[in-house]
Image (cartoon, rainbow, N blue to C red):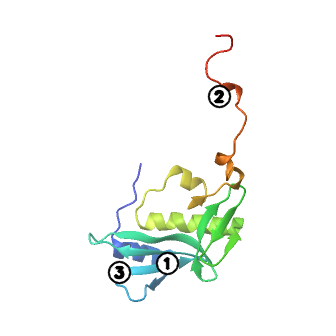
Amino acid sequence: MARTPKRNYEQALTWLRDHGFDILDAPGTEGRVFLKKNNCSAAIERQPDGTAKIFAYPGYLVAGEISKLINRGYQQFLKTSKTEVPATADQLKALHGFTEELKEALSLTSLYNESLGTVSDNYFYDRVAGREGKERKPRPWDKQGKAGA
């Protein structure tokens, strides 16, 4: 099986430029850049060993801010500090492609479950919220011992 060659920070930036990413220097910092493509964004920084590391994880841009993808069990949402909007199929597809390309550029491992589709940062299932505090009748399999013993 062929492996992606390990790239250092400069090689990763070159790869990203060659693949259509816009690269913007992070204001007031050295060795940090913001990446943008297809209305998705992330940020990487140079490590002391010369490699690149993600410091702002990929998200879809909502009102100029990198959103976090959250899953509410029935729908995925894009959440920023100011708003939360339902994610569309086109947004999820763009975010998935962006994330996969970024991993390739940085020589990161792409996990099987992540390759199948977009993975949320957080999972919130409202259908089970508050269920823990309610008392319920014992179920047959909850009873201790055997009947007639």
Q: Name the residue under label 3.
A: 31
User: What is the CA distance from the residue labelled 3 to the residue labelled 1?
Assistant: 13 Å
Determine whether label 3 and label 1 are within 8 Å by CB: no
Residue 24 image position (x, y, % from top left)? 46, 85
Q: Furthest residue to the bottom?
A: 28
- Which marked residue is nearer to the observer: mark 1 or mark 2? 2
In the image, 125: left or right of 98?
right
* Res 21 seen here: no
Q: Residue 144 — which label? A: none
Give me the residue at 41% from left, 76% from top: 13
Q: What element carries label 1?
A: strand
Residue 61 image position (x, y, % from top left)? 60, 77
Residue 58 image position (x, y, % from top left)? 53, 70
- Amino acid type, mark 1: Leu
Give me the residue at 43% from left, 85% from top: 26
Give me the residue at 71% from left, 65% from top: 89
* Res 67 seen here: yes
User: What is the CA distance from the residue labelled 1 to the residue labelled 2?
Assistant: 53 Å
Q: Name the residue under label 2.
A: 142
Q: Mark 1 points at which residue?
A: 35
Q: What quarter of the picture does the C terminus occupy? A: top right
Residue 63 image position (x, y, % from top left)? 64, 82
Res. 138 image quadrant = top right
User: What is the CA distance from the residue labelled 2 to the residue labelled 3?
Assistant: 58 Å
User: Quick one: label 3, few (<14), some, or many (20+) residues within 10 Å?
Assistant: few
In the image, 68: left or right of 4?
right
Pick the residue in front: 31 or 10.
31
Sooner in the amino-acid sequence: mark 1 or mark 2: 1
Determine whether label 1 and label 2 are within 8 Å by CB: no
- Which marked residue is nearer to the observer: mark 2 or mark 3? 2
User: Quick one: label 1, few (<14), some, or many (20+) residues within 10 Å?
Assistant: many
- Amino acid type, mark 2: Asp
